[in-house]
Image (spheres, rainbow, N blue to C red):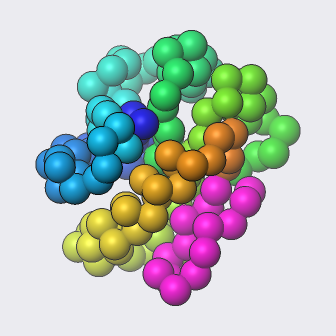
Amino acid sequence: MNFLFDANMPPNLWAKGVAAFSHARFEQGQIGDVIHLREKFKASTPDLEWIAALGKEGGWTIISRDGFRKKSGAERQVLRQYGLSVFVLQKAWANQPYWALSAQFIHWWPRIVVHACTTERATLEVPWRTSAKFQQI
């Protein structure tokens, strides 16, 4: 499974750092590319365009901080059309200091990977509390 961090996610620690942390830590085939949106598309690329491109390629999961919450939006339609999954950080993540945010995401990362590899077409919210479970949105 490949993972793309949306433009609203910090590129250096999260995309590059998570990719480095993931190397040789998961079963064969669970982790492919782990990249930030800007590594694959121009920053100005419209959401519908890059989502459709990922969908046509196949094998991608999107990690986002605040997008894809509307159930009937055009983005959600394209996600469903191509069977892409998205993990959206709960709004509680927005008010956290950088290091706490980063540490908490690293804590969630193994669960995100396992869930992404076993689920298709899901739009899930990642709660702040690690004792909580993913919620369908």
Residue 93 image offset from top left, x and y in percent = 47, 70
Is residue 74 visible in the rendered image? The answer is: no
Instruction: Please give the count of numbered marks on the rendered protein.
Output: 0
Residue sitting nearer the eye, 93 or 3: 3
Residue sitting nearer the eye, 115 or 97: 115
Reply above or below: 91 against 70: below
Reply above or below: 137 against 116: below
Residue sitting nearer the eye, 125 or 98: 125
Q: Based on the picture, tell me whether residue 131 belongs to the magenta stretch.
A: yes
The residue sitting at the right extreme is: 72
Question: Residue 34: which quarter of the image?
Answer: top left
Is residue 53 visible in the rendered image? The answer is: yes
Reply above or below: 52 against 130: above
Residue at figure coordinates x 49%, y 28% from the top left: 59
Question: Residue 77: which quarter of the image?
Answer: top right
Reply above or below: 134 against 3: below
Magenta region, main secondary structure = loop
Residue 137 image offset from top left, x and y in percent = 74, 57
Residue 98 image offset from top left, x and y in percent = 27, 69
Residue at figure coordinates x 81%, y 45% from the top left: 71
Residue at figure coordinates x 37%, y 24% from the top left: 43
Q: Which residues are magenta?
A: 124-137
Residue 64 image offset from top left, x and y in percent = 49, 48
Q: Quadrant of the N terminus?
A: top left
The residue sitting at the bottom extreme is: 131
